[in-house]
Image (tube, helix red, strand yellow):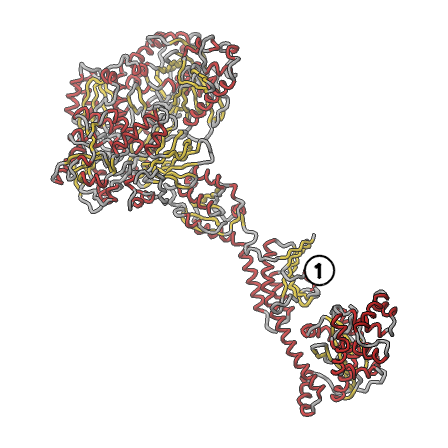
């Protein structure tokens, strides 16, 4: 059976309180206790234990509900009416009951009748000190809370032992051992980020913005979401797995997760800040390489050395252009993943984050043969496939430059790679790799693609269409129709719509645009304008 | 001024028993004393304080001691006359009338016997209009009138006259003297002028006692509407009707404390408990005080309408618990401290009884 | 050898006699009408009951009699008494005989005087005993009254003056005056004790006649046995004691009835209801003895405080008249009494009585003609019976000392009215052969001793005082003939005396035990 509960509200701190019946069975009344009346009320929960004298008990009893009053009845001998008044007071303040340290004979029938009528339990303890007794009772009553505070203290102690440089794994392991729970940190995809790999949740659908409890007997998964910034949705979940836990244990561990999540969140935030700082530095160096200012050559070489970037040999640049569900933050968090994917295929150059993708290069001692570019393109394609498979929603297009010697050569190769990537992206699709050598005549287009004035013109040209094109279908139809050499049939096939739809849309396009699509020149201009608008939008594909 | 008749005496005994609220000493012996005194010395006149010279001296007389001793050491009669004469001699003035201190229990009747012997009238007023166990528990204390000078006398001729600085000290000294003098003595305290009594005393309490007794006697005879008439006259209310299911007597510090528990006849889940300290002092229903001293609590036998004293309480008795507001003269500053529940050591607030508002 | 006892009870209507063995088994029983001269009745009953019984096995004879009670109630055969109170100067405000019914006062109180003497609550003398006054009073009594009753203040605690006064009287006049002392008669409450002591002295003559009649009846049958009279609390006193304390027998009738009924039912703790023709009496037995009344008991209009069984009576009997006017059913208090035999509807009479109701309701059968009440309105029958049931319940409740349910033993000619179930009552028992319950109660009576003293715990400690009181009670029981090996304390009552310094406490202890076997 699976039961998932979203814990929208924090439960009362003292979940599963002790009942008076349980208190009687607990052995806390070690010198013997007699329930002399009010048995019907023994199921009431006891939230606290207070002490006082039977004289003036109304003040003692004027507290919050659920209190058990331990009253000193040593001076009751002649004034047993005070028992009745205490019972009345307990009833009116919804107390859990009355424990009277006095002789049994002091409870006259009026008191027992009243207690039975009002269902207020009256327990008589002979020969016990009320303060000592109350202390014993309080321990039992407070036991759930003591367990809670003990456990929380253990969590805090474990967190304080974790050194500032320790990895997340060390934090999770420390906390997990302290409270004897398997802990894992997962991301939104439910993938393990740190901790115990056996503690990942059974379903990513349970990872929502509030803490959840998933019961999958005999296991119970507790998920505590973490947001790294204000107003940011949670990006990580701290998961604890408990085997056949009690209600109290669940409640306690929930509290522990909250505390641990602060520490884990802090670590995640500081990791992110480090990454951002490093990325900014790397990008600065990269910009220096590309700008090629001779004056700072020495400084640049030093930076290259600090970063461990090798430019000593034949450098082949790779420009990766990301689009789709990306933002600079995601680029940062995905860098490691990309780095692994590249390295696994021998592409062991630096990976430098840009706001819209990554830049890398590979260095060879000797000048690679002319045919080697195909080999690199294949490896990059494989690496990208592996990466994109793990990063849904991302589209990636790569451009590869020719190998050149040294730092200056890298600069040239980087420029080529970027141009190639632009071409690759302009071609559309989920993913694409373009080597500069394979570009051929397409290189002519680069000038158009790079021209700001043409981009402006392209927008002006297509503006009537774009202003009407709410979902982008008109622009897409126009491009595909032109790509398919004005064949409505082929365009319909490629777009997966009926030919008549294409014909209708083309008719509409013709009426919207001021150009004549039957004129080859005008047609070419429109086709180019489509590519440029698409590129400027950073949208590699619109077939979604 | 009017003459007290023997019929009045019977009604007065009944009224005094009721006003004794379960204690106050059995008026039976006092009644025998009054009868004998009236046989030996003639009748007694009851008089209003305003009929007397406002400057005229009025003296009180009462039994002080233990009820259990008085039944064994019956008064001689002379202790009361000795005590009164000693006061007159000490004050250098002869009294124009006697007054009961306590209209409730046996002390209601004692001054009548003495008055018969001394040939003085008895004032229709007192300082309690119920029974209380201590000398300072009077409306006179509230008015700032001292109990002293006062005299305590025994039947042999032993006599002490006290001057004290406060009424509680008077109580302590009198008790101490009584211990040495045989626990059944005469006390004369609160010497006052007739004018002071008219101003500060509880007016008409002797007549009230007789009238109350008369109406209760009618109830006992089973006359139609008599019970309602009785309750209306006393401004009393039946708080509970039930049978006694427990009596718990305890003795601490020389005071016989006790509790009587009553189960309601119609609704057995209702329980009343009444706390006793010589008198019936507080009635609780289900843990809440409903009638508290100085208001009166009286138990009447359900069948015979006889007032039940604390000594004759018995398991299974069927009773009406009557609450009766105390004399209106009690309601003035200091009452609760002097005769409220806390004055008797009870940790209970005074719960005033509702009255018709016909009195001040 | 089997030892047999004779029990005789002389009641207002019947004189019963039984012979029982030492196991309490009834060997023989008779019932006859009470005669104007009770001695004749005793003799006749004795004649009947010992027919066929081995006289040599009879060792003891017990008599319960209403003679003294009837003497007071009918003011018959009472002797005048000289009343001497040792209390002056205290108590002068209330003379002896105050509040007595005037006829009784005139008949009984011959002359009276209050002289110096008596004690305070703390044991000091109120005044030294005025011995001259005792002598003078004794001499003035001679020739005027046959007996003298002496009462001193606080005699239950300190009776030295009473003993001394008795000594002086005896020294002065010899046997010319019989002497009664208050501390032997009653307890705390001087006026009531004095009254009881006076009545006791007034009964000396009656008592002597009864005892002599009893003895002569026994002697007439050649029975030389120990003879006892039963007293109010269900225990025995010797014939000799009975002549000194006849007042202690005035309540023995209902006591013997209750004890007999209980013993016949095999119980020691029970409520007993005796329903006659006019009234029903309820009493209670605790540990085999009737509970004593705590309130003052009036005998013949006089307040006394001697020991009497606690009884509650109401007008509920077989002859109680029932009326039904327009739906309002009224029961009692009028009764046709013993005339129920002729006046009830079932017996052909014209008065609707509870016996008729009981018959119509199925509780009574075999008495009269049930057909005569066949068309009685069932609503009237139910209303009357539910009134009866309620009264029985109220009586039982009032008599019980605690909330525990107790068995209720129903006896008497009207006991058919008692329902089979009564709330608060464990079971209703109707013992067979309860007709001779009174005589049986007399035959099984035990010897006892009791004390009622004021102790001051401060001086000796509570435990020591209680031990002393218990020993005195046991000694008294053994003196009364109890088997020392079987004497037990049957009750201890402590009444703390408020106001009293030195922790004064009135202690009442009673001990009782079966009579010691006679050694021949």
Q: Position of residue B151 (x, y in %)?
A: 18, 39
B228 or A410, nearer to the observer: B228
Residue A459 in which image quadrant = bottom right
Q: Is residue A124 above or below residue A418?
A: above
Q: Secondary structure at mark 1?
A: loop
The residue at 27%/12% (across/down) is C77
| Residue placed most toward the observer, C214 or A75 | A75
Q: Residue furthest bottom?
A: A295
Give x and y (percent) for residue C309.
36, 23
Q: Nearer the viewer, residue B194 or C505?
A: B194
* Residue at image point 22% right, 27% down: B4
Q: Is residue C360 left or right of residue C448?
A: right
Position of residue C228 measured from the top left corner of the image (x, y, whole percent): 35, 17
Quadrant where the C terminus of chain A is found in the figure:
bottom right
User: Which picture quadrant has residue A527?
Assistant: bottom right
Q: Is residue B279 left or right of residue C381?
A: left
Residue C257 in sight from this viewpoint: no
As displayed, is residue A402 above or below residue A125? below
Q: Write the residue at 50% across / 53% down.
A: A139
Measured from the top left, where is residue B315 in percent x and y? Answer: 40, 30
How busy is the neighbourhood of tag 1: few (under 14 within 10 Å), some, or many (20 plus)? Answer: few
Disc tally is 1
| Up/down of B45 relative to A269, above or below | above
Q: Is residue A13 above or below residue C265?
A: below
Q: Mark 1 — on which chain does it sit? A: A
For residue A401, side relative to residue C279 (left or right) = right
Q: Which residue is mark 1?
A: A203
Between A322 and A493, the residue placed more toward the observer is A493
- Residue C410 can be seen, yes or no: yes
């Amino acid at each position: 059976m699976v039961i998932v509960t979203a814990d929208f509200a924090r439960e009362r701190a003292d979940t599963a309180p002790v009942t008076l019946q349980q208190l009687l069975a607990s052995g806390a009344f070690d010198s013997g206790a007699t329930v002399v009346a009010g048995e019907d009320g023994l199921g009431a929960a006891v939230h606290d234990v207070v002490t006082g004298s039977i004289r003036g008990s109304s003040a003692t009893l004027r507290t919050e509900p659920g209190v058990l009053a331990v009253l000193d009845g040593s001076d009751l001998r002649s004034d047993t009416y005070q028992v009745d008044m205490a019972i009345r007071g307990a009833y009116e303040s919804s107390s859990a009951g009355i424990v009277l340290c006095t002789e049994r004979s002091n409870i006259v029938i009026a008191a027992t009748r009243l207690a039975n009528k009002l269902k207020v339990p009256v327990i008589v303890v002979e020969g016990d000190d009320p303060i000592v007794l109350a202390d014993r009772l309080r321990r039992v009553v407070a036991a759930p809370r003591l367990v809670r505070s003990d456990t929380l203290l253990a969590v805090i102690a474990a967190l304080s032992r974790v050194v500032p440089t320790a990895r997340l794994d060390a934090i999770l392991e420390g906390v997990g051992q302290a409270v004897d729970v398997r802990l894992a940190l997962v991301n939104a995809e439910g993938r393990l980020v740190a901790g115990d790999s056996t503690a990942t949740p059974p379903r990513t659908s349970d990872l929502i913005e509030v803490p959840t409890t998933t019961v999958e007997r005999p296991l119970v998964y507790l998920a505590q979401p973490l947001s790294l910034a204000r107003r940011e949705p949670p990006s990580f979940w701290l998961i604890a797995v408990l085997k056949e836990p009690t209600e109290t244990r669940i409640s306690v561990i929930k509290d522990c997760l909250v505390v641990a999540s602060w520490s884990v969140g802090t670590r995640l935030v500081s990791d992110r800040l480090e990454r951002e700082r490093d990325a900014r530095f790397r990008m600065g160096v990269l910009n220096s390489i590309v700008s090629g200012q001779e004056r700072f050559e020495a400084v640049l070489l030093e930076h290259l050395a600090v970063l461990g970037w090798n430019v000593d040999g034949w450098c082949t640049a790779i420009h990766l252009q990301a689009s789709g569900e990306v933002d600079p933050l995601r680029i940062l968090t995905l860098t490691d993943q990309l780095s692994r994917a590249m390295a696994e295929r021998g592409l062991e150059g630096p990976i430098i984050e840009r706001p819209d993708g990554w830049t890398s290069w590979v260095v060879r001692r000797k000048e690679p043969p002319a045919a080697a570019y195909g080999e690199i393109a294949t490896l990059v394609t494989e690496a990208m496939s592996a990466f994109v498979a793990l990063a849904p929603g991302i589209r990636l297009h790569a451009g590869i430059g020719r190998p050149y010697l040294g730092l200056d050569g890298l600069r040239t190769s980087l420029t080529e790679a970027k141009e190639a990537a632009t071409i690759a992206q302009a071609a559309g699709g989920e993913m694409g790799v373009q080597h500069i050598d394979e570009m051929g005549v397409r290189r002519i287009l680069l000038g158009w693609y790079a021209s700001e004035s043409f981009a402006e013109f392209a927008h002006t040209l297509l503006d009537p269409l774009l202003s009407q094109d709410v979902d982008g279908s008109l622009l897409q139809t126009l491009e595909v129709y032109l790509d398919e050499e004005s064949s409505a049939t082929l365009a319909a096939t490629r777009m997966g719509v009926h030919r008549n739809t294409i014909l209708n849309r083309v008719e509409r396009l013709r009426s919207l645009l001021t150009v004549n699509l039957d004129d080859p020149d005008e047609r070419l201009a429109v086709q180019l304008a489509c590519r440029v608008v698409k590129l400027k939008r950073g949208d590699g594909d619109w077939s979604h | 001024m009017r003459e007290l008749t023997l019929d009045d005496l019977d009604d007065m005994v009944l009224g005094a028993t009721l006003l004794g609220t379960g204690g106050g000493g059995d008026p039976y012996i006092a009644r025998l004393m009054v009868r004998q005194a009236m046989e030996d010395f003639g009748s007694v006149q009851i008089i209003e304080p305003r009929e007397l010279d406002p400057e005229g001296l009025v003296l009180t007389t009462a039994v002080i001691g233990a009820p259990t001793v008085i039944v064994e050491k019956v008064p001689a009669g002379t202790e009361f006359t000795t005590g009164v004469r000693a006061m007159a001699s000490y004050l250098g003035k002869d009294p124009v009338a006697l007054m009961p201190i306590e209209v409730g229990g046996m002390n209601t009747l004692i001054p009548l016997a003495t008055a018969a012997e001394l040939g003085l009238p008895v004032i229709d007023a007192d300082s309690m209009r119920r029974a209380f166990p201590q000398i300072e528990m009077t409306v006179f204390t509230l008015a700032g009138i001292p109990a002293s000078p006062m005299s305590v006398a025994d039947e042999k001729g032993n006599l002490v006259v006290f001057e004290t600085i406060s009424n509680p000290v008077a109580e302590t000294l009198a008790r101490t003297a009584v211990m040495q003098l045989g626990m059944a003595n005469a006390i004369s305290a609160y010497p006052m002028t007739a004018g002071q009594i008219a101003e500060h005393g509880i007016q008409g309490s002797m007549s009230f006692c007789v009238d109350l007794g008369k109406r209760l006697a009618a109830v006992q005879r089973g006359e139609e509407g008599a019970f309602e008439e009785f309750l209306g006259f006393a401004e009393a209310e039946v708080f509970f009707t039930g049978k006694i299911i427990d009596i718990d007597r305890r003795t601490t510090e020389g005071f016989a404390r006790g509790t009587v528990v009553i189960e309601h006849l119609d609704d057995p889940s209702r329980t009343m408990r009444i706390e006793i300290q010589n008198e019936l002092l507080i009635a609780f229903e289900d843990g809440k005080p409903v009638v508290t001293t100085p208001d009166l609590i009286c138990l009447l036998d359900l069948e015979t309408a006889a007032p039940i004293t604390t000594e004759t309480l018995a398991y299974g008795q069927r009773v009406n618990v009557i609450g009766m507001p105390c004399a209106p003269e009690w309601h003035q500053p200091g009452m609760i401290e002097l005769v409220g529940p806390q004055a008797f050591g009870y940790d209970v607030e005074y719960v005033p009884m509702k009255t018709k508002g016909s009195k001040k | 050898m089997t030892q047999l006892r004779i029990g005789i009870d002389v009641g207002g209507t019947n004189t019963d006699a039984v012979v029982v063995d030492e196991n309490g088994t009834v060997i023989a029983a008779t019932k006859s009408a009470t005669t104007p001269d009770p001695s004749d009745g005793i003799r006749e009953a004795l004649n009947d009951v010992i027919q066929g019984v081995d006289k040599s096995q009879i060792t003891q004879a017990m008599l319960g009699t209403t003679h003294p009670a009837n003497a007071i109630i009918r003011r018959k055969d009472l002797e005048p008494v000289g009343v001497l109170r040792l209390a002056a100067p205290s108590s002068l405000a209330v003379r002896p005989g105050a509040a007595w019914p005037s006829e009784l006062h005139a008949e009984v109180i011959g002359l009276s005087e209050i002289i110096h003497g008596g004690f305070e609550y703390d044991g000091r003398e109120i005044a030294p005993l005025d011995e001259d006054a005792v002598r003078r009073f004794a001499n003035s009594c001679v020739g005027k009254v046959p007996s003298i009753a002496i009462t001193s203040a606080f005699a239950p605690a300190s009776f030295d003056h009473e003993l001394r006064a008795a000594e002086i009287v005896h020294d002065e006049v010899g046997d010319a005056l019989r002497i009664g002392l208050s501390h032997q008669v009653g307890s705390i409450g001087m006026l009531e004790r004095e009254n009881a002591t006076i009545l006791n002295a007034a009964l000396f003559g009656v008592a002597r006649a009864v005892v002599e009649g009893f003895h002569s009846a026994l002697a007439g049958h050649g029975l030389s046995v120990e003879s006892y009279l039963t007293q109010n609390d269900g225990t025995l006193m010797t014939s000799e004691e009975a002549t000194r304390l006849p007042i202690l027998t005035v309540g023995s009738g209902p006591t013997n009835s209750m004890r007999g009924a209980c013993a016949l039912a095999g119980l020691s703790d029970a409520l007993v209801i005796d329903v006659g023709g006019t009234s029903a009496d309820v009493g209670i037995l605790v540990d085999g003895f009737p509970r004593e009344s705590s309130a003052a008991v009036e005998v013949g209009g006089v307040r006394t405080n001697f020991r009497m069984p606690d009884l509650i009576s109401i007008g509920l009997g077989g002859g109680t008249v029932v009326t039904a006017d327009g739906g309002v059913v009224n029961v009692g208090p009028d009764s046709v009494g013993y005339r129920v035999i002729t006046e009830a509807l079932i017996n052909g009479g014209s008065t609707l009585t509870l016996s008729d109701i009981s018959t119509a309701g199925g509780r009574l059968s075999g008495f009269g003609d049930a057909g005569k009440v066949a068309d009685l309105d069932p609503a009237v029958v139910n209303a009357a019976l539910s009134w009866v049931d309620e009264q029985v319940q109220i009586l039982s409740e009032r008599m019980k000392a605690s909330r525990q349910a107790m068995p209720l033993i129903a006896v008497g000619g009207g006991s058919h009215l008692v329902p089979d179930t009564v709330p608060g009552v464990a079971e209703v028992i109707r013992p067979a052969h309860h007709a001779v319950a009174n005589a049986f109660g007399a035959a099984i009576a035990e010897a006892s001793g009791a004390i009622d003293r004021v102790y001051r715990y401060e001086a000796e400690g509570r435990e020591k005082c209680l031990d002393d009181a218990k020993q005195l009670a046991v000694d008294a029981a053994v003196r009364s003939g109890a088997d020392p090996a079987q004497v037990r304390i049957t009750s201890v009552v402590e009444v703390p005396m408020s106001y009293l310094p030195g922790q004064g406490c009135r202690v009442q202890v009673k001990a009782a035990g079966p009579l010691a076997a006679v050694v021949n």
